[in-house]
Image (tube, rainbow, N blue to C red):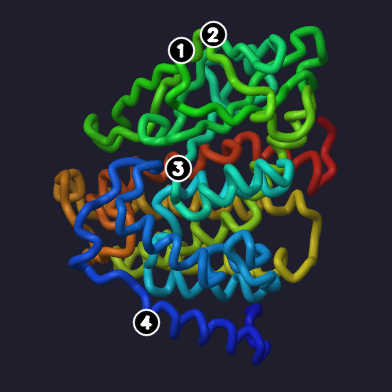
Amino acid sequence: MRLGSDPRVEAFRAEFSAFLDAHLPTEAEAVPRSKSSADVPEWARRWQRTLFDAGWLLPGNPPEFGGRDATLPEQLAHLEELSRRRIYHSWNPQGLGIIAASILTFGTAEQKRSWAVRILRAEITAALGMSEPGAGSDLAGLRTRAVLDGDEFVVNGQKVWTSGAHDADVVLTFVRTDPDAPKHKGISVLLIPTDSPGLVRRPFGSIADPDDLDFNEVFFTDVRVPKENLIGELNKGWGVAHGSLGHERTLLWLSFAERLEDLVRDAPSDREWYATLQMDLQALRLLGYRALGGAGDPAELSVLKLLGSEAVQAASLHALEERGAEGLVHPERTSPPNHMNAEPFSSSWFERYARSFAGTIAGGTSEIQRNIIAERVLGLPR
């Protein structure tokens, strides 16, 4: 089973391929490299604006938001072509795929113009402020407070694991605005500029490398945020949260399929795990196409997320273990360099395995996905 056999979809794919042939940045142009998920070098900003202006950034969007009203099969063809050429979609992935999408879904017309379009055109970059020290997968447990004071909110609290915050211009921040409401209510969403007085960002290293500075702690001390920066309705941020994660999850399985294809190419083996890797890849694609075809319950996206993230992690571990001590050499390259791809996807086997844990955590942990599958797909009791 494969979506995209429709002649119109294949014509769409061919048009995009021709566009890439004509406009892709050269290796010489792409020398400055991104240092975090919100650090977008100038060449990458120009490239993202080129995609936006031509309607190839997010083809499913209307033209004024970087698209061409593409159908879902056409959007899949677009992402498949990027994957085939190993082109990283955006060096500000959360800004593009979650934050701008959330503003377009829940924001006002003015917010779409002043924030979403600027993020989509890479004029500014954005980070996502969800997780807190005591509220990771349990977003409803967040404690960062925002109190309305006239025409401004006053924000106090802390976020953590905020990818790229130290390089971002704005953080989409989930805050508690009604402390007396039930746990899943009383949450609101604010766009907070990172140069706001009282906002402090502290980047810290990851398991992959102490100098891999992407994660941040973000502290808010009496940070004043204009009321017009409220995204969606007051105290109804839980719906925005689900919408934000929905944007992240819909085609998230495709990124896992891409990682699995990378492993098939980069880690050939005659051992049983390599056959399992190829079967997992085929199963993920078939289930993904089925979901895009409209079959099944939306909760089945959790099956795709769980299968994809766990398969990438398992295969990465096997590839590392098979290479023994050599797999621990770091830094190292495990696939040919590609100036349009992100370096972590071709780094040492140790780093590739270490980074696989992000897939089983971000967008809802594997444990959360199993709960969703048990309750909403299999119908098991809570």
- Callout 3: SS: loop
Q: Residue at x 22, y 53 (%)?
A: 32
Is 339 left or right of 251, judged from the image as shown?
left
The alpha-carbon separation of the residues under discs 4 and 2 comes to 50 Å
Residue that protrudes farthest toward the bottom in the picture: 7
Q: Residues within 10 Å of mark 3 (few under 14, many from 20)?
A: many
Q: Residues within 10 Å of mark 4 (few under 14, many from 20)?
A: few
Closer to the chain start, of discs 4 and 3, is: 4
The alpha-carbon separation of the residues under discs 3 and 2 comes to 23 Å
Q: Residue at x 32, y 31 (%)?
A: 206
Tell me which amino acid carries mark 3.
Answer: Thr
The answer to whether residue 288 shows anywhere in this view is no
The alpha-carbon separation of the residues under discs 1 and 2 comes to 6 Å
Q: Where's residue 108, x and y in %? A: 73, 42
Q: Residue at x 39, y 51 (%)?
A: 91
For disc 2, the marked residue is 222
